[in-house]
Image (spheres, helix red, strand yellow):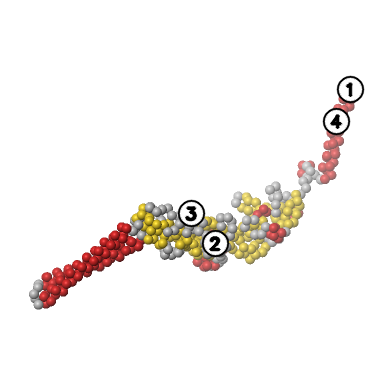
Amino acid sequence: MNRLLISRQRMLIPVVSIGILSILYYGCTSSGAGQNGLPRMAPAALPVITVTSGPATTYREFPATLKGKVLVDIRPQVQGYLEKLYVDEGDFVKAGQPLFKISDNIYREQLNQQQSNLLAAEANMLKAKLQFERLKPLLDNNVVSEVQAKTAEADYEAGKAAVEQNKALIANAEINLGYTLIKAPVSGYIGKIPYRVGSLVANAQADALTVLSDVNEVYAYFSMSEQDFLSFTRDYPGGSIEDKIRALPPVELVLPDNSIYTQKGRVQTVEGQLDETMGAINFRAVFSNPQGILRSGNTGRIRLSRAYSKVMTLPQEATFDVQDKVFVFTVGDSNKVVSKPIGVLGKTANYYFVGAGLAAGDRIVYSGTANLRDGMTILPQPISIDSLLKARPL
């Protein structure tokens, strides 16, 4: 009895399997088969945007280094020990304000010595003058020889020269004495002070006493590569480089925290030749700094803008890169996708500004492009580019 039951169960297994396969086969064939008899995949539903054209402003950014308009090394002109420091690092000083005092004992004594020498020279000159004036009438009456009179005159002239020489030495001693009190040549901020009271300083030392920077206006130095510079010469109006610089719109300074400096600047100059070692050319922009926010040594990025009357704006999510080229998937007839390279004029954090490769009205796959291939069919889900711009402005 058990053997008969087992045999019947074994006979039922193939029958059930054939029934299941029949059902699966019917299901596949009823929904339609693709190539090689495999089931056809349903088109993927993907978001699609329609490209529009309109005015826009593109930006290009270049790393920049900031320096005060006036940057002065404060160095001693005479040797001596630092006696006083009137300022501290970071202080703002005005032109003429005392900064450092060098011990002046030696230079004061030198001045006193030169003043004494002047008195002696003046006395010798007076003595020679009296001798010459005494002999001159005697020479007229042939009482003394001409040689004696000429000698007295020469002594008098030598005395006058000695007086003038000592006056010059006094002036030099006064200058050296004045050098012991170092004053600010311009208004600005005090930099690092590597020396302290008691340090021996001299005019031949390597380090300056400090650096004084006038930051009422700040220079921002930035450079363009040779390729960027050629684009600059093509894209901006003007018959010469000077004309192009004068026609440039105001530039912005992006600070290290990615905030935008409140004051706009202007590009002033460009170097006359490319740096052969770097393959770049240097520019200089100037920014007003009334609140003293910017300091020498700060860094940032110069943002150079360019306005377009008609340009296409495209979210960066809708693009992909292949060998340094930017591509998109366009949606054509029968909702089939085709990849196309595009020409990027500029970009923001979220968008590309397209100048070639697309036309207004083209449909672009917005996201989900990773698995797409040319010729595949999708189910477009329209999305308004205006809604994207409202959610994430340029």
Categorize mark 4 by other alpha carbons within 10 Å: few (<14), some (14-19), many (20+): few
Q: Is residue 190 visible?
A: yes
The residue carrying mark 2 is 232
* Residue type at the position of mark 2: Phe
| Residue 123 percent across, percent down from the top left | 20, 68
The residue carrying mark 4 is 13
Residue at screen point 19% across, 67% down: 124
Q: Label 4 near label 3: C-beta < 8 Å?
A: no
Q: Which of marks 3 and 4 is nearer the N terminus?
A: 4
* Residue type at the position of mark 3: Met
In terms of secondary structure, where does tag 1 sit? Answer: helix
Q: Which of 330 and 217 is in front in this view?
A: 217
In the rendered structure, find residue 2 and report the number of the disc placed on it. Answer: 1
Q: Label 1 near label 4: C-beta < 8 Å?
A: no
Q: Which of marks 2 and 4 is nearer the N terminus?
A: 4
How far separated are the C-alphas under marks 3 and 2? 18 Å
In terms of secondary structure, where does tag 2 sit? Answer: helix
The residue carrying mark 3 is 278
For the N terminus, the quadrant is top right
| Residue 334 percent across, percent down from the top left | 76, 54
Q: Which of marks 1 and 2 is nearer the N terminus?
A: 1
| Residue 363 percent across, percent down from the top left | 71, 57
Residue at screen point 12% across, 70% down: 148
